[in-house]
Amino acid sequence: MSEIAKFHLRAPGLADADAIAEVHLTTWHATYAHLLPDCHFDNNALEQRKAMWRSTLSSKQPPQRLRVTEAHGGIVGFAYAGTPLDDEDPARDLQLYTLYLLPEHQGTGAGQALLDAVLAENHAQLWVAKDNPRAHSFYRRNGFAPDGSEKIYPGTTDLVEVRLVR
């Protein structure tokens, strides 16, 4: 096993909010820089992500389906699932909100472990950028398929998302 393949999953705490935000922004930049303007990846965007994750992790009811993965002493990915959000007609009662893994840790099994930790074998839905072939391949291997629903990611004009279900 290579050094990079060693990872550890756990539930995060409030102290992890900033690290999660940094992974969130870094992975968004790596995945969507060709689709979104630079303002989605600047210091203001990072501060907004930090505030969002601090709020999420300081809730009196901590998220039950939120896990981080660590490697080499730092958070390198996270996944979060729950009741469908921003979906007028959800196809499932469970939605994968996010699954992000730093590019250098993709292909190590950490993404699969995160998905399994937050969804297990449950029926679920998720929204993924139409122009994200790597993610589509990963989710297809995990039994997800498009159901024909599409939407434009809020605050953008060009980021089309498709809903996948299993």
Image (cartoon, rainbow, N blue to C red):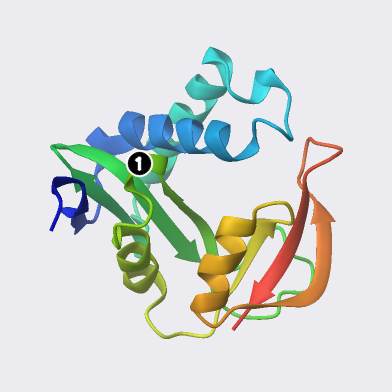
* Image vertical order of residue 73 relative to residue 65, above or below: above
Q: Residue at x 24, y 44 (%)?
A: 13
In the depicted view, which residue is nearer to us: 90 or 38? 38
Regarding residue 83, the answer to whether it shows in the image is no
Q: Residue at x 31, y 70 (%)?
A: 117
Q: Position of residue 126 (x, y in %)?
A: 61, 66
Regarding residue 4, the answer to whether it shows in the image is yes
Q: Secondary structure at mark 1?
A: helix
**Direction front: furthest residue:** 2
**Direction right: furthest residue:** 157
Q: Residue at x 40, y 29 (%)?
A: 22
Locate residue 133: give its quadrant. Answer: bottom right
Left or right: residue 32 compared with residue 28:
right
Q: Amino acid at mark 1?
A: Glu
Other residues around mark 1 within 10 Å, as few (<14) / some (14–19) / many (≥20): few
Locate residue 41: give its quadrant. Answer: top right
Q: Position of residue 106 (x, y in %)?
A: 38, 51
Q: Position of residue 90 (x, y in %)?
A: 71, 74
In the depicted view, which residue is nearer to us: 8 or 80? 8
Left or right: residue 129 compared with residue 93:
right
* Quadrant assignment for the N terminus: bottom left
* Quadrant assignment for the C terminus: bottom right
Q: Which residue is mark 1?
A: 104
